[in-house]
Amino acid sequence: MSLRSALHVADARPGTSHDGRLQGASRTTVPERAGFCAAAATCKYSLRNPRSKGMRVRLTSGDGTVVILHPLQYQFGPSSEPRDWDANWLVISGHVELPDGRSWSFTDPCLTTWEARELGLWLRGVLSGDVQPAAINGEDEHLLIFTEPNVAFSLASRGDGYATIRVHFSVESLPPWLQGDGGDEGAESFEFFVEAQLAQSALVDAIASWDQELAAFPIR
């Protein structure tokens, strides 16, 4: 299936108004959800055997929108204390490409080992239908958020064989044209996002790749 996406933000150059950027998403119908879940039920083998072994997590849409996430390393060394918070921070590398040709990258310790696994569980919930689409209204409970606000996720819509995922960026993960003076936050938390419409097979591969990446970073 072809992949499509929409960049649901205004042209976010300095001085541009954000009015109208945050659009609501209609909830999926029962037949749509059933169709996506039926497809997901056939993918258990693929989840254990990604077609692109060793690939970074890549969310790609047909219009040219690309979001790549990759855990690079632990931020700190191991600790003698089990589940020590500092010992479990992961340095995440991110790269985003927009349909208009603009792109940016970031590297920041913004997920713990357990938060990274929470993202994998959330993506599985999108695939199974347990995660429901949510309108954007500025309330954090509609987002998958983490301790550090660099990235967040929400489900925009679900159709027959595809899901549209919002990836939200804040603080150090914002594109440079939205960064404030001195690198400070230049937009409200989670206000800036891109949308990627993923076929069921692409979502399966993203989940499998993320699981494979995290295997090198157990909870310590």
Image (cartoon, helix red, strand yellow):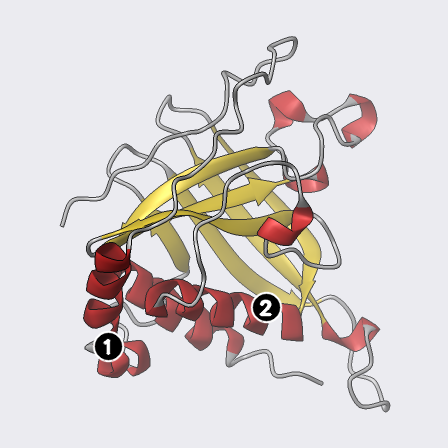
Q: Determine the image quadrant of residue 186.
A: top right
Residue 116: give its label.
Answer: 2
Is residue 201 something one can see in this rendering?
no
Between tags 2 and 1, which lies in front? 1
Q: Position of residue 197 (x, y in %)?
A: 31, 45
- Tell me the amino acid under the disc marked 1: Ala
Q: Please name the residue that numbered disc 1 is placed on.
A: 41
Write down the quadrant of residue 102 in the picture.
top left
Taking the spot 13% from the left edge, 50% from the top edge, the residue there is 1
Choose top left, top right, bottom left or bottom right for residue 184.
top right
Element type where label 1 sits in the image: helix
Residue furthest to the top: 15
Q: Is residue 213 above or below residue 220?
A: above
Q: Is residue 86 left or right of residue 31?
A: right
Question: Whole-Å distance between the Cαs marked 2 and 1?
Answer: 23 Å
Q: Is residue 121 above or below residue 162?
A: below
Name the residue at 43% across, 76% down: 212
Q: Position of residue 205 (x, y in %)?
A: 30, 66
Q: Is residue 40 visible?
A: yes
The reply to whether dot 2 and dot 1 touch (C-beta < 8 Å) is no
Q: Is residue 129 above or below residue 137?
A: below
Residue 197, numbered label: none
Amino acid type, callout 2:
Ala
Q: Residue at x 71, y 85 (%)?
A: 220
